[in-house]
Image (tube, helix red, strand yellow):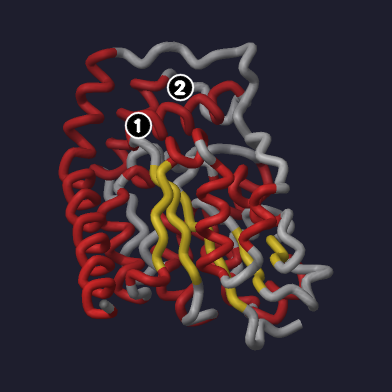
Amino acid sequence: MMLGERRFVAIVGAPKAGTTSLHHYLAQHPDICMSRPKEPHFFDAWYEQGPARYLEDCFAGGSNAAVLGEATTSSLGLPFVAERIASFAPATSVIICLRDPVDRAHSAWWMHHRSGIDPAGFTEAIRANEDQHRAGVRWDDSDGPVRWAQTYWEYVRDGRLRVRTYLDFGHYGPAIRRYRRFYPAGQLHIVSFARLAADPRSVVRDIFGVLGVDTSVAAQIDTTPRNVGNTATRAPSMPVATREWLWRHFAESEAEVADILSEISGGQASKQQEGE
């Protein structure tokens, strides 16, 4: 199967920001084929195997679909992925789900902790993540893609957590800037985790409109949230000092997100005025 004239939608993250639910919602549209699995990791872990293998392995039954899509959440935080997606499908609609980065980090840690992947407490895990940065663990140099792929496949093989990304994947500002290099504002769509949770049909209707498929289907989809975790085992409260440290840590990135949102909304307003 080839992509051909089909539209492509990439839900690129952030992790623990509603991407599993959104993947499920979009998959219910008869004209959209969402990937199986939900996170193929093609663009970050097996890109060298080529798009034909990706389309064949992850989109079975999608030959008649008008839109293909996926939701690998590491795609937002890894600096080399945006260009790869743009090379694969220049007309991609990129969906970025954003959640408070402090709460997102805590949620991601809790998912790993309760499953036994990360035995460290939250503060200890955050400190270990910061130590990685000090030790020079990074993905934005020439060897970054290879090192990440190796790390990913080692994790798949044995389930051992070798790197922590609680901090890395919460730096939304620089990540969105990277995507803006390859996609104009009309192809880049930012979704609030809070809005997705409160009014999923409205969010999905908007996305269906962007993708050019029947928006009335949004009224019929099952909007039961996915991947919400076991509510019987709640995460422990975040230490106040850790929360305050994280607020300071993410402050610059969050200011950049605010600037980007202002730029996007300002650009859209200008286009509307030009069309009047």
For label 2, the residue is 120
Horizontal side of residue 136 vs 196, given as left or right:
left
Q: Do we see residue 162 in this rendering?
A: no
Q: Which residue is depicted at the point 60% across and 25% down?
A: 116
Crowdedness of circle 2 by 10 Å Cα count: few (<14), some, many (20+)? some
217 or 72: nearer the viewer: 217
**Vertical arrangement, residue 42 with respect to residue 123, above or below:** below
In the rendered view of the protein, which quadrant contains the C terminus? bottom left
Assign a secondary structure to mark 1: helix
Of mark 2 and mark 1, the one earlier in the sequence is: 2
Residue 232, quarter of the rendered image: top right
Assign a secondary structure to mark 2: loop
Horizontal side of residue 101 vs 253, given as left or right:
right
Residue 197: x %, y % from top left: 51, 35
Number of numbered labels in the structure image: 2
Q: Which residue is depicted at the point 62% across and 26% down?
A: 229
Q: Which residue is outermost to the right?
A: 61
Horizontal side of residue 11 vs 215, given as left or right:
left
Residue 215: x %, y % from top left: 62, 61
Hey, what amino acid is under mark 2? Ala
Q: Which mark is residue 128?
A: 1
Q: Which residue is depicted at the point 48% across and 33% down?
A: 108
Q: Are marks 2 and 1 in contact (CB under 8 Å)?
A: yes
Residue 238, quarter of the rendered image: top left
Q: Which residue is depicted at the point 53% across and 80% down?
A: 89
